[in-house]
Image: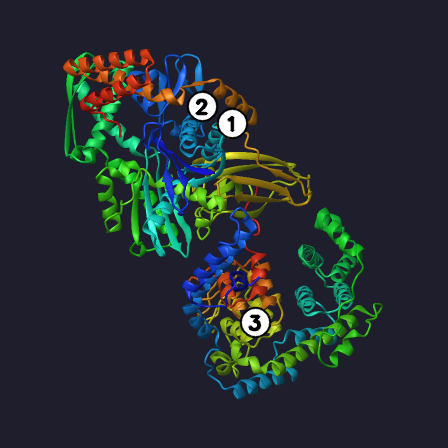
């Protein structure tokens, strides 16, 4: 069985292909489809993933981490408490492991293979890191699928259309992607993709947070004195306000910060005013995708909104303004990608319900190498980008270009691989390099053939060949930051094995206690007393080890918490 | 393979049918197989491109149709005959060969300019298939003339030899002859040419020489030419002999071309206005623009050379409807095309229909000229005024051979490492 996983910045989901040619979402241990992409280390050094970890972001910010997807493919390390250091791949692997356990529980069989979605605009290193994360979680990643393409698969199926051209506007927690797709005769063809992998709901959150900080400063609260816990509570409050602003025009929340009670107010016009810079950033990829797809806007049959952040009212308004029509959001924006990954898994399994469908994708970036440009024999521009695979070329694709040495008698060439759109390699992203010996030729420049192969997973292979000696070299990315070597992966696997992970049957109890602790901190007065009382009763019930009693008390505690909790998780 | 074959449908302009065929094929292949997918994808895109070009094709047909002629075919034929006659009875005082002949035979003197011209002319003959040995003998004899400007002739020879050496498919016998001339002139080929070229030449020379096909001309003058030239004869006599050959050859060639190709006259620019109007004008009284136009339209190599010699900078003529490179390209010999490009004529010039020389060759399905232009550096992807490049035109005409040829020259070398 191949499963489909949407490994999101803020939330992750898992789904499985079903017999009817569609997909089914798998609930986690709490019965929710969305698992927060948060990892936390419990007091006994066991790992908590998902909702309990999300609650602990507030109570134990120093032992909890979120939004690590943004650092995939970099060398960033996260310190959880003293001594434990995690890489983004490892944290993602923990999330994947938890999702895998959910699916295994749901299916009653082992899950070993998965299709994982990545933002279309994820770079080569980021894609490799995602593959490694899967490997660390014990999953064979049979395919990486671009998020908007996955969403489009789900959408196309949902609408059951025969022939259509539509645009997927995917604003997730941390990334923004646009894809234009054409559907005909069971073929789903991505025509163009553009995006920004550092633009998402979290950036909008930062805007609210910055405003809150200002408000606090105006009310005389010294920000530098604030406790880490206060800051994470502020963040939670900002998130809450953001969600609430989707339905209301203004929010006002009293909070206790730094032992002072303050009221934080925020409203929609202010939000829209402050988000103007981000909205401008959205425009660029949209225009590029439309241009690359060579399609007039009027020929689009639909504009589809995907990703939780598109719930913010200003996003549909913005899309409507640009496309001169009202965007569709009749598919749950949180679930579309996960459903799409599962459909892709079904296609991959060649299940008969999926046999009549194919999906082709494109290379999101231009890929090429660094060359020298002789302006005059003495004036050489050494940092020129020579594209080999143009962006939005259908994949898989393999292209070959011939280059030559710069000087007579040159015995080695360095093939530096870059991705990006700028003519100068300085502005493009470095992927790796190959050092290639060439026969020393004093008479004429030596020709070198460079072959780029870009596969359906979006992974690039570079092969250089000296035409006169026939010697070949392929790219072993050595200098690319944030990519683990084989040894590192092995070590990582051992480290993760050694971690204690909360047994699945205890996770529910642990989560409820985390939630209680969080609520205790957030509430004051009568509510705080009630929370405290509930926690004590629950602890007592757990101590009795009487499962009947535990179940009964748990239900009561949840009822009490739900009543009080204004921060009911999404 | 033809894209329609890959898609497994008959050629159609129905986009819907193409998509359907593509979808059907796509379902049978694996997306993990890059080659298979690439082939299908290319076929699909070519087919779609074809339908987009369909409208364009009709416009294209009018573009390549012969220009409405201002003179009838019979009149053009008569003009050509008149022209031929005037050459044969020497009414053209400016015919180089005649001038040269006069000086050589009557005054027995050779000047620098003439030697240079002779060298250049032999290059032209090389293009037309002159036997290497004849060429070599001729050159040597010419170089032995007392007034011979040693340095300039050497420079010219070097230039030519380098050109041979750099040629992708060099004619071995020519190189052999050139090298022998070098030896004869006691020039050190290694230092003059650079070691790599000499190495290359040696390599070629090591392989057996295939004798050239000696049937270059379609009449009896061939017999005359292939008679061995005695190397021991007096220099002046030999040069004179060879020059007589030239005159004869030129006269014959014009006659062959004009008679045999008269059916194609209407597509040549030969019969358009200025040629008719100015046929009575004398060569001296005409301005340089007219001379160039006349020479080009008459498709006479030596006249063109004459016109160019008088004003080396001349690259345009107000009497021509298209940039001169188009006419140069129409000459049977490649030499003028090369010469114009060498003088800086743009290969990206548009004719009155908005096509570049390369695109015209593609439209005419003229592989040989296309190869020449590509070799001279014509840009395959340069768009016509209507935005179509040579590649697209070849694709539209479904000319596979041309596509293969063009593809060899698309992005040959992109940069240096």
Query: Which label is found at residue B121?
Result: none
Residue occupied by mark 3: B330
Q: Earlier in the sequence, mark 2 or mark 1?
A: 2
Element assignment for label 3: helix
Which is closer to the viewer, label 3 or label 1?
A: 1
**Could you say which is closer to the camera, residue B65 or residue A500?**
A500
Q: Residues within 10 Å of mark 1 (few under 14, many from 20)?
A: many
- Residue A446: image location, x then y, percent: 64, 44
Q: CA distance from mark 3 to mark 1?
A: 63 Å
Which residue sits furthest right?
Answer: B232
Q: Tell me the subunit letter for badge 2.
A: A
* Relative horizontal placement of residue A55, taking residue B406 as reference (left or right): left
Can residue B77 be seen here? The reply is yes
Image-quadrant location for residue A560: top left
Determine contact: label 2, label 1, CB under 8 Å: yes
Residue occupied by mark 2: A87
For the C terminus of chain B, the quadrant is top right
* Relative horizontal placement of residue B331, taking residue B56 as reference (left or right): right
Residue occupied by mark 1: A484
Q: Tell me the subunit letter for badge 3.
A: B
Up-down relation of residue B147 to residue A438 (above or below) = below
Q: CA distance from mark 3 to mark 2?
A: 69 Å
Q: Tell me the subunit letter for badge 1.
A: A
- Residue B225: image location, x then y, percent: 77, 75
Up-down relation of residue B371 to residue A421 (above or below) = below
């Amino acid at each position: 069985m191949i499963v489909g996983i949407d490994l999101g910045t803020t939330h992750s989901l898992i789904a499985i292909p079903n017999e009817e040619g569609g997909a089914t979402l798998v609930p986690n241990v709490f019965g929710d489809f969305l698992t927060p992409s948060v990892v936390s280390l419990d007091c006994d050094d066991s790992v908590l993933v998902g909702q309990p970890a999300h609650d602990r972001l507030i109570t134990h910010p120093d032992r909890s981490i979120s939004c690590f997807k943004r650092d995939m493919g970099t060398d960033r390390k996260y310190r959880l408490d003293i001594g434990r250091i995690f890489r983004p791949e490892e944290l993602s692997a923990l999330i994947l492991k938890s999702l895998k356990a959910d699916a295994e529980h749901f299916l009653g069989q082992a899950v070993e293979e998965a299709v994982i979605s990545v933002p279309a605009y994820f770079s080569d290193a980021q894609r490799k890191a995602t593959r490694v994360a899967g490997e660390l979680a014990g999953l064979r990643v049979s395919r990486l699928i671009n998020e908007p393409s996955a969403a489009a698969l789900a959408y196309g199926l949902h609408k059951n259309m025969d022939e259509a051209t539509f645009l997927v506007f995917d604003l997730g927690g941390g990334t923004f992607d646009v894809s234009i797709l054409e559907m005909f005769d069971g073929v789903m063809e991505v025509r163009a993709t553009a995006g920004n992998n550092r633009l998402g709901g979290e950036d909008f959150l930062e805007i609210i947070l910055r405003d809150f900080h200002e408000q606090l400063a105006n009310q005389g609260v010294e920000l530098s004195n604030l406790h880490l816990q206060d800051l994470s509570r502020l963040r939670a409050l900002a998130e809450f306000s953001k969600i609430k602003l989707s339905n209301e025009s203004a929010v006002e929340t009293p909070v206790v910060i730094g032992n002072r009670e303050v009221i934080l107010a925020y409203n929609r016009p202010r939000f829209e005013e402050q988000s103007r810079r981000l909205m401008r950033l959205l425009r660029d990829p949209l225009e590029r995708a439309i241009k690359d797809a060579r399609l007039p806007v009027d020929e689009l049959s639909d504009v589809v909104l995907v990703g939780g952040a598109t719930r913010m009212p200003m996003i549909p308004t913005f899309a409507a303004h640009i496309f001169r029509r009202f965007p569709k959001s009749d598919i749950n924006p949180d679930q579309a990608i996960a459903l799409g990954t599962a459909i892709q898994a079904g296609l991959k399994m060649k299940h008969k319900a999926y046999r009549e469908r194919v999906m082709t994708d494109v290379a999101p970036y231009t890929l090429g190498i660094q060359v020298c440009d002789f302006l005059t024999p003495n004036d050489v521009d050494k940092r020129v980008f020579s594209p080999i695979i143009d962006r939005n070329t259908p994949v898989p694709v393999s292209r070959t270009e011939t280059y030559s040495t710069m000087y007579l008698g040159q015995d080695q060439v360095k093939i530096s691989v870059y991705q990006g759109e700028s003519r100068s390699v300085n502005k493009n992203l470095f992927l790796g390099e190959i050092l290639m010996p060439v026969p020393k030729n004093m008479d004429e420049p030596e020709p070198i053939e460079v072959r780029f192969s870009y596969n359906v997973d979006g992974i690039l292979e570079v092969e250089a060949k000296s035409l006169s000696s026939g010697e070949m070299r392929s790219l072993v990315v050595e200098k690319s930051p944030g990519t683990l070597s084989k040894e590192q992966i092995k070590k990582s696997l051992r480290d993760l094995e050694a971690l204690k992970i909360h047994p699945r049957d205890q996770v529910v109890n642990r989560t409820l206690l985390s939630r209680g602790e969080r609520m205790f901190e957030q509430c004051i007065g009568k509510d705080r007393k009630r929370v405290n009382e509930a926690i004590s009763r629950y602890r007592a019930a757990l101590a009795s080890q009487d499962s009947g009693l535990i179940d009964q008390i748990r239900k009561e505690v949840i009822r009490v918490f739900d009543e009080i909790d204004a921060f009911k998780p999404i | 393979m033809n894209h329609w074959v890959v898609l497994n449908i008959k050629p159609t302009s129905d986009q819907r049918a193409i998509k359907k065929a593509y979808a059907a094929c796509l379902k049978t292949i694996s997306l993990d197989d890059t080659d298979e997918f690439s082939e299908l994808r290319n076929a699909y895109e070519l087919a779609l491109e074809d339908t987009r070009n369909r409208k364009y094709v009709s416009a294209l047909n009018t573009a390549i149709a012969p220009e409405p002629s201002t003179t009838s075919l019979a009149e053009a034929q008569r003009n050509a005959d008149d022209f031929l006659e005037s050459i044969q009875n020497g009414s053209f005082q400016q015919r180089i060969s005649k001038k040269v002949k006069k000086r050589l035979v009557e005054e027995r003197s050779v000047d620098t300019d003439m030697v240079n011209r002779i060298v250049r002319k032999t290059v032209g003959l090389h293009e037309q298939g002159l036997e290497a040995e004849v060429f070599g003998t001729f050159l040597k004899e010419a170089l032995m003339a007392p007034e011979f400007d040693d340095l300039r002739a050497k420079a010219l020879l070097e230039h030519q030899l380098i050109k041979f050496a750099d040629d992708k498919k060099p004619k071995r016998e020519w190189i052999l002859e050139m090298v022998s001339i070098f030896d004869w002139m006691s020039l050190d080929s290694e230092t003059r040419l650079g070691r790599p070229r000499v190495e290359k030449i040696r390599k070629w020379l090591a392989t057996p020489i295939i004798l050239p096909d000696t049937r270059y001309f379609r009449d009896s003058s061939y017999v005359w030419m292939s008679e061995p030239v005695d190397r021991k004869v007096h220099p002046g006599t030999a040069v004179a002999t060879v020059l007589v050959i030239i005159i004869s050859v030129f006269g014959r060639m014009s006659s062959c071309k004009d008679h045999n190709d008269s059916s194609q006259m209407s597509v040549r620019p030969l019969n358009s206005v200025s040629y008719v109007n100015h046929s009575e004008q004398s060569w001296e009284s005409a301005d340089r623009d007219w001379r160039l136009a006349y020479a080009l339209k008459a498709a006479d190599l030596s006249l063109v050379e004459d016109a160019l010699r008088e004003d080396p900078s001349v690259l345009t003529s107000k009497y021509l409807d298209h940039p001169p490179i188009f006419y140069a390209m129409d000459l049977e010999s490649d030499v003028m095309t090369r010469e114009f490009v060498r003088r800086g004529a743009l290969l990206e010039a548009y004719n009155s229909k908005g096509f570049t020389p390369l695109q015209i060759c593609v439209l005419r399905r003229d592989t040989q000229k296309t190869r020449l232009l590509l070799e001279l550096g014509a840009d395959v992807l340069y768009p016509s005024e209507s935005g179509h490049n040579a590649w697209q035109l070849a694709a539209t005409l479904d000319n596979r051979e041309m596509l293969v040829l063009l593809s060899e020259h698309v992005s040959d070398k992109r940069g240096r490492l």
